[in-house]
Image (cartoon, rainbow, N blue to C red):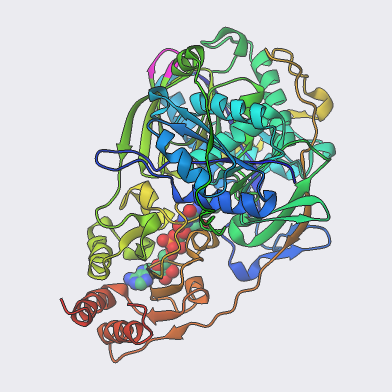
Amino acid sequence: MNVVVCIKQVPDPEIPPAQFKVDEVARAVVPPPSVAPVMNGYDAHALEAALRLKERHGGTVTALSLGPPSAREVLKRALAMGADRACHVDDPVLYDADSWLAAAALARAIYRIGGESGRSGQNGQYGYDLILCGRQASDTDAGQVGLGIAAFLSLPALSPVQQVEVIENGRLRVERLTEEGYQVIDVRLPALLAVSSEIGEPRYPPLRGIMAASRAQIPMWTAADLPPLGRKDDGDWPPLARKLRLQRLYQERREAACEHVQGESPADAGRALADRLRQVGVI
Amino acid sequence: MGTVLVVAEAQPRHAGNMPALAPISYELLGAARRLGGDDVVAVLSGTEVRPLAGELAAHGAAQVYVADDPALADYVAETYLPVVEQAICHAQPSLVLLGQTANGRELAARLAFRLGCGLVTDCTRLAVNAGTLVMTKPVHGGSAIAEYVAEAPAALQMATLRPRAFEPAGRVGAKPAAIVGLEVPAAVVAQAAERTRVIETVRQVSSGPRLKDARIVVAGGRGVGSAADWHLVAELAAALGGAVGATRAVTDAGWAPPSLQVGLTGATVTPDLYVAVGISGAVQHIAGCAGARTIVAINRDPNANIFKHARFGVVADYRQVLPALARRIAELRGD
Ligand SMILES: Cc1cc2nc3c(=O)[nH]c(=O)nc-3n(C[C@H](O)[C@H](O)[C@H](O)COP(=O)(O)OP(=O)(O)OC[C@H]3O[C@@H](n4cnc5c(N)ncnc54)[C@H](O)[C@@H]3O)c2cc1C
């Protein structure tokens, strides 16, 4: 099975809240100088899912990233974790893309990957069987790009996914999270799945992988290298354009007014807490 | 603002419960009416949902599209999409609102890309400013707030609304409902089944009140330490008559099912009391509980971010605090 995994580089979402700064004029986040950007967490889960499928069923894993030159770092990490190859889409016209533009560019890149792979996979024309993305990126928190790619490529799509298994050639058994549990869904390939963290911890890249990845050649495509999508059944392919404009980005300040309840011992503090909550009418 | 179309949701059906609208449906209608006035229509899909059309009308939908079909018993985008598309085609709205719920998130994105329109997900505010719709949503987990507008004037715009962020619609009195029945063509059902077929639906909810509706929630984090200690959280919840919640660290570790996760990618809860046990207070977690009236934190790290959001806190090892707290609560409640 041939899998394409879409991976975004994002500011580290785990930085302490006090270090998080926004430049309101530039409408951009100011990254703290000492903290490097990272592979989006849910994309790492998607990559992990792809690597497990490859271990069990063979095939290839292609990591694809849209972003500035620094995005090559997350592609190197993907290679170090076990991806077979990586593709980088980098063009200033695509920077700060909204969900629509990012999905359109990535769909075109996947279309090109399919044509270039030289193998038809199990599904003839596509040359890829499965596209995996994270359920959302931790910067925009939009959760749209994966589902948009599926729409552009006319594929079935599910989000958020906690489990993927191959049941037979050309079909998957997928668990999709719902509010009260999950659905078990039989999905036809090719398909797109947006993966959630329940899939399991992403592996750490082994040292050997890191060494090899540091020497890897990663092709870079600009917008002009992306083929217009020629095989959409219903109508023309959408242009590389934006639908939304970010008009303002700001932070909300919060007051810290916590009353610390104390006691002779932790148990005492627990009892005092109950009394205090009763006193103010909370319980 | 022209017509606003609300994509309503029914409560998930399972043995023993009656058909009912999900709370988000009232919130969507509330937001729609504040923007669209009387020009609000709704669409509802599912099975045995037709009786709910009147309820949507009574809360401000001038027209209700209903697709009531056994083929829609399980939500899958492939069958729900064509229904909403039919409603859009008929109502010609300028704005379509969905809930930022498990199904709404998926459906909204699929729909927006099919229709070629802009979508802002997880909005916490909608406003019309000098004729322009401004869609406000938290980004970076909640560390920043972004305001989006359409890049160019567009005939159609879409947004999903964060649960509990919008005032639900009140009753507008007994309005006669204009109900339009929608069909799901057999060809759509057949194609959907070929692409994505639901084999099974698994419910993983804990006993006691439902997390999303509970007045009291006791949530545990990684600081609880292990699956074996998780019962301490459950026991405090039981003493308070509340529901159990968890952080992603806990659900990822398998100490509790994903349906108990509170936060940006889990449930949004707005209880009167939210007790956070061994929870650091990451922005993505706070996103799901910031609307609680009173947050109480028990954490051994005095610098934990959760104390910036809590009204009451105890800095200690929760293992020593919780049993005494639960016992004292039981005493105070006289049982
Ligand atoms: C895009 C994205 C979406 C996310 N969505 C969610 C979401 O929906 N919900 C969510 O919860 N998280 C979410 N997260 C993860 C989030 O960033 C945090 O990693 C997570 O909430 C941390 O969980 P925690 O507080 O349980 O664990 P930790 O951050 O590890 O905190 C554990 C706390 O327990 C305390 N502690 C340890 N031992 C004890 C003890 N014995 N007694 C008392 N206190 C103790 C520690 O001091 C610490 O503060 C998301 C992250 C991303 C990037």
Residue A81 visible in the shown view: no
Where residue B128 sits in the image (x, y, percent)? 75, 54
Where residue B52 sits in the image (x, y, percent)? 43, 40
Closer to us: A89 or B186? B186
Left or right: B315 in relation to A211: left
Quadrant of the rendered structure where residue B238 is? bottom left
Q: Is residue B181 magenta?
A: no
Is residue A198 shown above or below A222?
below
Q: Residue furthest bottom?
A: A264
Residue B114 visible in the shown view: yes
Left or right: A73 in relation to B23: right
The quarter of the picture showing ligand 1: bottom left
Closer to us: B179 or B120? B179
What type of secondary structure mainly makes up the magenta span? strand
- Residue at 35 percent across and 82 percent down: it is A277
* Segment tinted magenta in the rendering: A167-171
